[in-house]
Amino acid sequence: MQQFEFARHRRLRSSEAMRALLKETDITVNDLIYPMFIIEGENIKNEVSSMPGVFQISLDHLANEITEIHQLGIRAVMLFGIPKEKDEEGTGAYAEDGIVQQATRLIKETCPDLLVVADTCLCEYTSHGHCGVIREQEVDNDASLSFIVQTALSQAEAGADIIAPSNMMDGFVKVIRKALDEAGYKEIPIMSYAVKYASAFYGPFRDAADSTPQFGDRKTYQMDPSNRIEAIREAETDVAEGADFIIVKPALAYLDILRDVRNAVNLPVVAYNVSGEYSMIKAAAKNNWIDEKAVVMEKLTAMKRAGAQLILTYFAKDVATWLKE
Ligand code: PBG
């Protein structure tokens, strides 16, 4: 009888068909949420210099853009707004005719079955660029909550399908859930940026959204990248407060956290493949140092493998196009 010498793992990799049969993780268009930057003004389509292929667009270009996204089969977009005027209290975030509110109405008229996820934060609307309001030179948690609630309500009012608070104030899920329920929006889910690190990978986003803090940084409200147990605490709190989805952000340098969170909670987990992660690939691909498509598919696969059910990514349109080819 022949002796067993060693395991023949290559047996299961022998052909394209064999590999397809054994693939454990797949990316489909249903996994993708596309973040968009809507700017107040007319006839604007500004490419963000640090994010090639990503544009700030004005409302008059939105219907065309949305139709294209819809035709690609993408199910959901996340909206960020860039107002003309900013002020201390971030008024543009919760104005009835705020830019995200207008964009939401337009999208729901153009493509009613495309889901609108509204980013609920103040930083694009405050003159100081912080995610809450300032009291005594500090980002005041409890004072900020009422503005966050107003923002969420006005987004729901405009027709947003999902509310996604990203401001990292303690208690935001609880107060938003309560307010939505009382206003009759019991069926609108909350996609909480539960686990959000104070990351240098957000740099290009702050160019795109014009939201760089004018003083200090976000370290008193966003998490320290060194911490792991804290991520579980944040996620568990938001589950208890009524979140329906849990976002982990950034994604690529935080795959361990994604897996930990996946194991700790039973809600759908969303990876936010952030701006800096996008720009690094774009820059390297431009120099022909890497194969863009292969690298993007590999990293999105890694995020799903780590536990993400959904991925927020600026590559969504590219990926949807590649999947159709
Ligand atoms: C706003 C917000 C940020 C991002 C999403 N929502 C920036 C920040 O916290 O400074 C970053 C997204 C990205 O980098 O792609 N609070």
Image: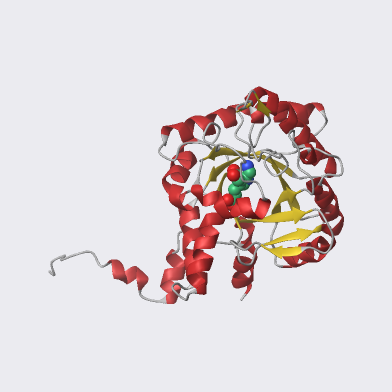
Q: Return the residue nearer the eye: 85 or 165.
A: 85
Compared to 269, does 147 lie above or below?
above
Q: Can the viewer see residue 194 in this picture?
A: yes
Q: Quadrant of residue 141?
A: top right
Question: Residue at coordinates 61% horizontally, 68% vertically from top-left?
Answer: 318
Find residue 190 and report its horizontal and vertical position in percent: 68, 38
Give the side of residue 33 with respect to residue 265, left or right: right
Report the label total.
0
Find residue 99 and report its horizontal and vertical position in percent: 80, 48
Question: Residue at coordinates 58% horizontally, 55% vertically from top-left?
Answer: 204
Question: Residue at coordinates 45% horizontally, 42% vertically from top-left?
Answer: 257
Q: Tell me how the rendering is colored.
A: secondary structure
Q: Return the residue nearer the eye: 285 or 179.
A: 285
Give the side of residue 108 with respect to residue 237, left or right: right
Find residue 105 and report its horizontal and vertical position in percent: 85, 50
Q: Return the residue nearer the eye: 247 or 73.
A: 247
Question: Residue at coordinates 62% horizontally, 63% vertically from top-left?
Answer: 49
State the quadrant of the N terminus. Answer: bottom left
Compared to 80, does 64 lie above or below?
below
Q: Can the viewer see residue 274 in this picture?
A: no
State the quadrant of the C terminus. Answer: bottom right
Q: Quadrant of residue 27?
A: bottom right
Find residue 305 and report its horizontal and vertical position in percent: 46, 54
